[in-house]
Amino acid sequence: MSETYMQTAQGQFQLQRFPLEKNNKLRAWDAADEYLLSDVAPKLELVENPRVLIINDSFGALAVALHSVRPSCVSDSFIAQKSTIENLTLNELAEDSVQLFNSLQIPAGKFDFILIKAPKTLAYFDDLLIRLQDSFTSDTQLIVAGMVKNLSASIWQTVERLVGETVPSKAVKKARLIYAQADQQRPVTENPYPVEYQLENTDFQISNHANVFSHKNLDIGTRFFLQHLPEGNQYQQVIDLGCGNGVVGLIFANNNPAAQLHFIDESFMAVASARQNFECAFNGRKATFTATDALIDFAPDSVDLVLCNPPFHQQAAIGSHIAMRMFQQAKQVLRSGGELWVIGNRHLGYQSSLKKYFSKVELVASNTKFIIVKAAN
């Protein structure tokens, strides 16, 4: 089982990774969280009623440890926000001791400390730092934390370009901190996000926020999936699960005018992009757009079709557990005769995985890199 107690300068806290998984051996925090909390503890004591902004907190470790200063927390992940709430409750802390904001919102006003866990997507980091310009004073302390392997030269260069001169910490347990204070004489950079492009072979204009996968063009897996989407009047209630920018659901909707589409992703930026793209394509057509944890909001036996390109990572952890959870939930929400269509890299072995949940598993199409599989009961 995973270690669940984090000891910090702020105290000891019990933390869990959500969604809860049996035999999970991964902690809800890493050495970069520990290092950042240790580093900032004495600095917070020097500022009266410090205003603290936390960005990209994976499972709430930073928010829970710093609850006493009532931090504001910005995240693009619904699961990260849910984890923060669950871990506050686990430690018998008030939910309102932390203010949660999604990634499209930067809380108003100036901050004394801005603490950022370095995100995987450089475009998202770029977008965040540009939108943070009004949050800085000449005394604001910006600290970017990450494992050394994740702090690429591009991360450093982005901070220096958009904030100011950087100073590195020494490495501790393979983690490092980057310190910066805003150069307020620096001209404000125009934000290039969201990015727009015309979807190939269509008249649809696609808009993508910075943290959306393949935000500059159509990725090759989605292109292959679009060539093999099902059609038919039997598909009335349809979910684009892990929708990203919503292109799969959009094209399905275009080919199936009677279908009711539901766009689901745990990324707030993905859902916002999907909404923008669908509403631009179909003026007035109804659909739902929800940032949530997979299919937990859908009733059993309520859906005809689930279209899914599962992620194979959660935060920095790579694995199949998110996909397996999606498959299990899809089985529960699909009506008798309903279908789950999945695209994935060939090496991920989704065909055999789906046989654990579905009695009928059929290969629809394949190429050298991807397979498309249909599963039904």
Image (cartoon, rainbow, N blue to C red):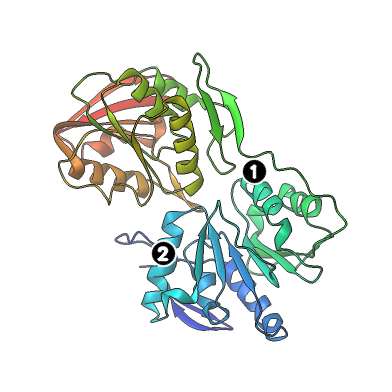
Q: Mark 1: which amino acid? A: Ala
SS under mark 1: helix
Question: Farthest right residue?
Answer: 185
Residue for badge 2: 83
What x and y, as percent, mark residue 265? 40, 44
Inspect this view and state whether residue 4 appears. no
Question: Farthest left residue?
Answer: 336
State which quadrant residue 14 falls in.
bottom left
In the rendered view, does 20 fall on the left or right side of 133? left
Q: Mark 2: which amino acid? A: Ser
What x and y, as percent, mark residue 66? 55, 77
In the rendered view, does 294 fall on the left or right side of 31? left
What x and y, as percent, mark residue 354? 25, 37
In the rendered view, does 74 fall on the left or right side of 129? left
Q: Residue at x 18, y 32 (%)?
A: 338
Give the camera-side residue of 94 and 10: 94
SS under mark 2: helix
Q: Residue at x 58, y 69 (%)?
A: 33
Inspect this view and state whether residue 372 appears. yes
Q: Residue 123 shows which numbered tag?
A: 1
Q: Residue at x 65, y 52 (%)?
A: 128
Give the camera-side residue of 37 and 49: 49
Residue 200's place in the image compared with 165, above or below, is above
Give the camera-side residue of 36 and 356: 36
